[in-house]
Image: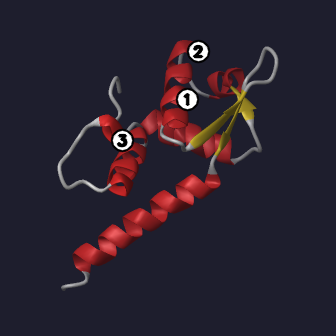
Amino acid sequence: MSESLAEIGIPGCAPDSRAVATRLAALSHPARIEILKYLSASNSCCCREVVDRFDLAQSTVSQHLKILVEAGLVRFEPDRQRSRYEVDRAALADISASVAALVNSCCSGR
């Protein structure tokens, strides 16, 4: 994602809609969903721990983590030689609530 969806100027698109779209775009890759699940099972992990868990190159895992951090779904904390990553549970709860509200508004007329 060279350009985040939040940076794209869409007339009439509310800022919160752009934020939701950015987060959903970050969730659009199966590896990132699996990484989120893995991170959710612990307080925090370094990139190496994620690499050891999945059959992905270190550079690939780093790129996926970068996308998740940029979307605000994962927090990054530098820790000497090993940076730590942890899920932002509030951000995931917000995206869940946003999707639920969208589904409810789209399906309420049935």
Which element type, helix, strand or loop, lies under badge 2? helix
Camera-side mark, 2 or 3:
3
Q: Quadrant of the N terminus?
A: top left
Residue drawn at the location 71% of the way across and 26% of the way down: 49
Q: Amino acid at mark 2?
A: Gln
Q: Amino acid at mark 3?
A: Ala
Asked where in the image residue 80 lies, by quadrant, the reply is top right
Which disc is residue 25 wearing?
3
Residue 57 appears at what percent x and percent y? Answer: 54, 14
Residue 77 appears left or right of 37: right
Camera-side residue: 95 or 41? 95
Report which residue position mark 1 lands on. 65
Residue drawn at the location 63% of the way across and 48% of the way down: 88
- Are the residues flagged by discs 3 and 1 in contact, CB closer than 8 Å? no
Q: Spatial distance from mark 1 to mark 2, Cα to Cα? A: 10 Å
Camera-side residue: 83 or 6? 6
Camera-side mark, 1 or 2:
1
Q: Amino acid at mark 1?
A: Leu
Q: Residues within 10 Å of mark 1 (few under 14, many from 20)?
A: many
Camera-side residue: 56 or 105? 105
Q: Spatial distance from mark 3 to mark 1, Cα to Cα? A: 13 Å
Which element type, helix, strand or loop, lies under badge 1? helix
Which disc is residue 2 wearing?
none
Residue 26 appears at what percent x and percent y? Answer: 42, 39
Residue 34 appears left or right of 29: right
Above or below residue 82? Residue 96 is below
Report which residue position mark 2 lands on. 58
Above or below residue 101? Residue 31 is above
Going from N to C along the chain, the mark reached first, 2 or 3, is: 3
Q: Residues within 10 Å of mark 3 (few under 14, many from 20)?
A: some
Residue 34 appears at what percent x and percent y? Answer: 53, 40
Residue drawn at the location 50% of the way across and 18% of the way down: 60
